[in-house]
Image (cartoon, grey):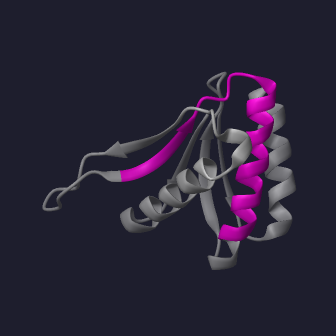
């Protein structure tokens, strides 16, 4: 699964970096393959920008752990304001949603379960 974010460069990098750290600190994902996806810098800037986090969610238990960790992270992140996330499922389906409040999280998690079909 790939979790990408919409916004300006610094905000996107902060969200992706925060989610990556959250996944790596989640005990049930300690053996999961978690990688950063970066893009080249904009003209006049240096260094690559972190823009997405990839997690190998190729089994139901790992998928469940990723979904749980993502939901918890999203609830915490929403304390700073809304967030737009694009999730690419293992089956290739892409979901883009903007969460504005904590009450949006269960519906987003259910959509991921339905659309990703894991």
Q: How far from the left and from the top, in percent, is residue 9?
A: 37, 62
Residue that protrudes farthest toward the bottom in the picture: 80
Q: Using residue 91 as the reference point, say whether residue 47 is left or right of it.
A: left
Asked if the stretch drawn in magenta spans residue 57, the answer is: yes
Q: Which span of residues is magenta-colored? A: 50-77
Quadrant in the rendering for residue 104: bottom right
From what the image shows, is residue 78 above or below residue 24? below
From what the image shows, is residue 59 above or below residue 50? above
From what the image shows, is residue 106 above or below residue 65? below
Q: Using residue 53 as the reference point, say whether residue 103 is left or right of it.
A: right
**Considering the image in quadrants, where does the N terminus appear?**
top right
Secondary structure that dominates the magenta span = helix
The answer to whether residue 68 is visible is: yes
Compare residues 54 and 86 and report the one nearer the observer. 54
Q: Using residue 59 as the reference point, say whether residue 77 is left or right of it.
A: left
Query: What residue is drawn where x is 64% and y is 76%?
Result: 81
Q: How far from the left and from the top, in percent, is residue 70?
A: 71, 51
Query: What residue is drawn where x is 43% and y is 50%?
Result: 51
Query: What residue is drawn where x is 54% and y is 61%?
Result: 18
Q: How far from the left and from the top, in percent, is residue 55?
A: 59, 35
**Considering the image in quadrants, where does the C terminus appear?**
top right
From what the image shows, is residue 91 above or below residue 35? above
Quadrant in the rendering for residue 19: bottom right
Asked if the stretch drawn in magenta spans residue 54, the answer is: yes
Compare residues 106 and 22 and report the one nearer the observer. 22
Please count the marks in the image.
0
The answer to whether residue 118 is visible is: no
Q: How far from the left and from the top, in percent, is residue 100?
A: 72, 69
């Amino acid at each position: 699964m790939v979790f990408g974010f919409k916004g300006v460069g610094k905000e996107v990098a902060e969200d992706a970096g925060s989610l990556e750290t959250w996944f790596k600190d989640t005990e049930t994902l300690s053996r999961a393959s978690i990688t950063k996806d970066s893009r080249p810098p904009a003209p006049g800037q240096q260094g690559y920008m972190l823009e997405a986090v990839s997690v190998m969610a190729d089994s139901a238990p790992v998928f469940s752990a990723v979904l749980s960790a993502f939901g918890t992270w999203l609830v915490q992140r929403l304390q700073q304001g809304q967030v737009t996330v694009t999730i690419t499922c293992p089956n290739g389906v892409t979901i883009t949603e903007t969460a504005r409040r904590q009450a949006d999280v269960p519906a987003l998690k259910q959509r991921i379960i339905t659309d990703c079909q894991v």
